[in-house]
């Protein structure tokens, strides 16, 4: 199946207060009312288009939300001060004490820690499952289950979730399927494939300039309004509100998302192919050797490619560290967490972004300590980058001339 590009956010039209080509930024935390009655009605949620207080909503945040809803093809979207702000609000909105969650075991370290450690306070049970095993997911459902949670392409192991398959299980059990689509905006149309709620960390590809922290929840009007409810909304009451200035800046960056994603994917695919030819242990959903390759092909928008993230296992942590330090010295990228920047970013997830996951569980899921995650940048000449990376590997003995020639 080839899904049509979900880039309708390109068609949105906004004008600024003075006819500017960019929408005006709302520089106010609070809003006046001409009548006291309208203020009361707005509190009750009965006046659409009226602003009350910027923790509830603001014009700039609504513009960005509209663009994200168009990106995922959902009825609407809310923005948050971070990806974790979005994730924690969704989960706490859907679950109460005594409830149960089914989650993929390979997820972002912060999400894992939130589910495993923080939710203990609320007596919410979690089953971590191998999300590529639909039978295991189905068997984990119990009376208390309130949601199924996964990432479309998992962090950092790049497992590909079968979203239509998971959606069928969710539907059979009347559960919402919540998908974190941070790794694959545009390339995996998660909502169209059956996710009920799609979450993004805007901090990564969507903003793309590593100068903002933000998140989003894309879903139905009912659910997104419930998050904003002044009496019971986790978005409203936990307070992870995005600042209007940042929302405006992220919206402007979103306009080039389609171009950037194609280039990130092209460059990552090129490196993955060349590394694999060199005999290195590389994981990338675009390679036929990847377990999730055919599922990815079935659910992707092909013009956006297989995404900008790959992993390379160089055997052990000291080699991984030496290689990352040398690549940074040669200006091939930065030794930094996060992803979606114009420059390649690399880190060893076992000792950084996934360090919340205990070592024995890391081992069980195949997260080895020699694993390097690459968020491949927008390099114009990726062949040159490849040759320079290869030179680093030869120098450090990660690769020998002999294997390189095979
Ligand atoms: C970074 C990340 C998050 C958390 O987002 P923040 O904006 O840092 O709060 C969640 N999920 C995934 C897959 C991520 O990569």
Image (spheres, rainbow, N blue to C red):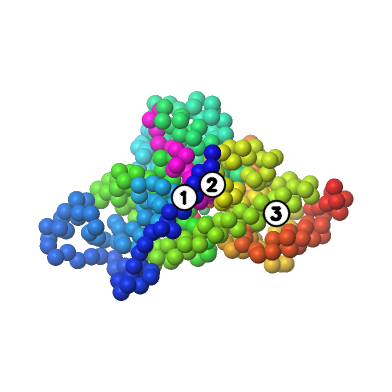
- Is residue 155 depicted above or below 67 in this figure? above
Q: Quadrant of residue 40?
A: bottom left
The residue nearer to you, when weighing 387 against 381, is 381
Mark 1 → mark 3, Cα distance in angstroms: 26 Å
Mark 2 — residue? 301
Residue under numbered circle 3? 271
Horizontal and vertical percent for residue 87? 43, 47
- Residue numbers of the magenta segment: 173-194
On screen, residue 312 versus residue 36, left or right, reads right
- Which residue is at 53% across, 36% downward? 162
Residue 88 x/y as whole percent: 41, 47
Quarter assignment of residue 16: bottom left
Q: Which residue appears at 60% of the width and 48% of the height?
A: 306
Q: Is residue 191 magenta?
A: yes
How far apart are labels 3 and 2 at the CA level?
Answer: 21 Å
Q: Nearer the viewer, residue 267 or 102?
A: 267
Q: Residue under label 1, please give it.
A: 6
Mark 1 or 3: the one toward you: 1
Q: What number is the disc on residue 286?
A: none
């Amino acid at each position: 199946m080839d899904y049509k590009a979900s880039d309708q956010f390109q068609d949105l039209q906004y004008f600024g207060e003075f006819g500017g080509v960019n929408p005006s930024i709302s520089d106010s935390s609070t809003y006046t009312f001409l009548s006291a009655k309208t203020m009361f009605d707005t509190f009750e949620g009965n006046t659409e288009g009226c602003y009350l207080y910027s923790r509830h909503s603001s014009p700039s945040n609504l513009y960005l939300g509209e663009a994200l809803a168009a990106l995922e093809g959902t009825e609407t979207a809310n923005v948050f001060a971070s990806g974790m702000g979005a994730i924690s609000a969704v989960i706490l909105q859907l679950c109460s004490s005594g409830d149960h969650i089914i989650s993929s075991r390979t997820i972002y370290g912060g999400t894992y820690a939130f589910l495993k450690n923080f939710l203990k306070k609320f007596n919410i049970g979690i089953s971590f499952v191998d999300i590529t095993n639909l039978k295991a997911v189905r068997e984990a459902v119990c009376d208390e289950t309130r949601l199924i949670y996964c990432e479309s392409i998992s962090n950092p192991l790049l497992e590909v979730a079968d979203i239509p398959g998971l959606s069928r299980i969710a539907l059979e059990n009347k559960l919402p399927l919540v998908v974190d689509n941070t790794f694959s905006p545009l390339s995996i149309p998660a909502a169209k494939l059956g996710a009920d709620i799609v979450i993004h960390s805007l901090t990564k590809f969507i903003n793309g300039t590593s100068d903002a922290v933000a998140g989003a929840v894309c879903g139905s009007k009912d659910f997104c309004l419930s998050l904003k409810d002044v009496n019971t909304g986790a978005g409203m009451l936990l307070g992870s509100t995005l600042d209007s200035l940042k929302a405006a800046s992220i919206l402007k960056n979103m306009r080039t998302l389609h171009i950037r994603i194609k280039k990130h994917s092209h460059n990552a695919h090129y490196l993955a192919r060349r590394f694999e030819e060199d005999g290195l242990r590389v994981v990338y959903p675009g390679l036929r050797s990847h377990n999730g390759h055919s599922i990815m092909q079935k659910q992707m928008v092909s013009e956006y490619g297989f995404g900008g993230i790959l992993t390379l296992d160089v055997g052990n942590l000291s080699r991984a560290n030496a290689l990352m330090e040398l690549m940074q010295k040669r200006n091939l990228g930065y030794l930094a967490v996060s992803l979606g920047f114009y420059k390649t970013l690399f880190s060893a997830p076992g000792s950084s972004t996934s360090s919340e996951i205990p070592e024995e569980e890391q081992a069980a899921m195949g997260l080895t300590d020699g694993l390097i995650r690459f968020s491949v940048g927008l390099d114009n000449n990726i062949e040159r980058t490849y040759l320079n990376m290869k030179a680093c590997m030869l120098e450090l003995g990660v690769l020998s001339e002999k294997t390189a020639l095979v």
